[in-house]
Amino acid sequence: MLDINKIRSDFPILSQKVNGKPLVYFDNGATSQKPQVVIDAISKYYQEINANIHRGVHTLSQLATDAYEISRGKLQNHINAKFAHEVLFTSGTTHGINLVANGFASILKPGDEVLVSALEHHSNIVPWQMLCEKTGATLRVIPMNEDGELIMSEYDTLLSDKTKIVTVNHISNALGTVNPIKYMIDKAHEVGAAILIDGAQAVPHLKPDVQELDCDFYAFSGHKMCGPTGTGILYGKEAWLNKLPPYQGGGEMIKEVTFEKTTYAELPHKFEAGTPNIAGGIVLGTAVDYMNEVGFENIQQQEKELLEHATSRLLEIEGLKIFGTSKEKTSVISFNIEGIHPYDIGTIIDKLGIAVRTGHHCTQPIMTFFCIPGTIRASFAFYNTKGEIDVMVEAIKKAQLMLS
């Protein structure tokens, strides 16, 4: 079991006040807060070993390179990738998805199909639309039901020998739905299609095993799992990464350059052009260490209890409707109150120190499906408490009275 007071003391921001009230931070789906050990690691890098990597024989460069590659190894172990060179450092999930989509521009042709799900974040829709416009391929959508679940029978029907890649999130950022990705991966492979999993909302809550899943690509961001912003990982199977062309040209990703021809470096450097976010990459390893020390079983138990408590308490509020009632769900609740715009609720409870997200959450197709402009989204992390949920519920009741 978690010592929640000890955990909360690890996060300096949680002790501050906002608008004169103790901060209640329920916007973890947008970004997580950072423990002191991560903050200290950023400072330590710049104070002690700041240097460019892979390019210098001097001591600081070698120290920075070693730390960066040690972090890559930590991420490899964390997701159980077979090889370290299958783990690419990126600036985040969006970067990783765009890297793969750009690579498929050399593979797709008119008549080919790309499958996306109705539950996707815009960053896992728009790159594929752009790809289809460029190549003449067709974008097909896996539909959802009123509970916010993908309809697997429709997915099975959509799959064919025309399907070249399927792309789906592990967990929905807007609804908290946990998708049956193992089933989806296996079915995609039956028709010879590749599959990319957007793991941005999954990695704060669980440890994906990419070998067990057998996914071809898995992308996620560091800032949602206690790490720095501007960091992320794209896992890709070795065979696929060797097949795809580089995403960007520049330093580090080359083997030899002449004006007549350039040859590319081996993995992973082929996809890591230019000076990366060195500090961020190193400290992402620190964040993973921290979360593993807390323990993902403990994280999941704490967040399960928070979700159950929040669902029960919120449903006490007259006129409140929760969107996303999937049987498999993680710690996100999207809801509205009849007759009140979500922005108005969010603005009022912010004055009481409570941070929630309001709007379409970069998932406009989901909002269109439910015929709503957006929702209020409360997203929980392992450092949150049931007491904070009670504070939020009472604040929402006050806001409802003010706006009625």
Image (spheres, helix red, strand yellow):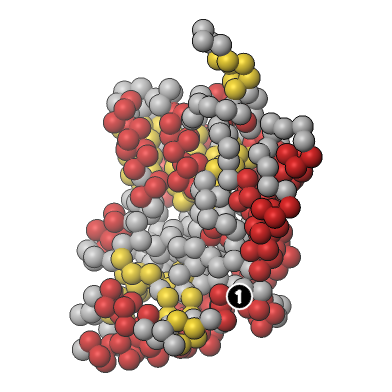
Q: Which residue is mark 1?
A: 12
Residue 277 at x, y percent in the picture: 58, 45
User: Is 226 on the left-hand or right-hand side of 392?
Assistant: right
The structure residue drawn at horizontal position 37% and vertical position 39%, both measured from the top left corner, is 127
Residue 234 at x, y percent in the picture: 56, 42
Say few, some or many: other residues with alpha carbon within 10 Å of mark 1 (under 14 / 14 to 19 / 20 or more).
Answer: few
Can residue 388 be seen here?
yes
Residue 274 at x, y percent in the picture: 56, 34
The foreground one among 374 and 272 is 272
Q: How many numbered marks, from 0 up?
A: 1
User: Disc 1 on helix, strand or loop?
Assistant: helix
The quadrant of the picture occupied by the N terminus is bottom right
The structure residue drawn at horizontal position 27% and vertical position 84%, both measured from the top left corner, is 319
Residue 29 at x, y percent in the picture: 47, 64
On the image, which quarter does residue 207 sit in? bottom right
Can residue 111 be seen here?
no
On the image, which quarter does residue 108 sit in? top left
User: Is 211 on the left-hand or right-hand side of 344?
Assistant: right
The foreground one among 41 and 334 is 41
The quadrant of the picture occupied by the C terminus is bottom left
Q: Amino acid at mark 1?
A: Pro
The structure residue drawn at horizontal position 41% and vertical position 42%, both measured from the top left corner, is 156
The structure residue drawn at horizontal position 59% and vertical position 62%, both measured from the top left corner, is 226
Give the residue at the far top of this rendering: 260
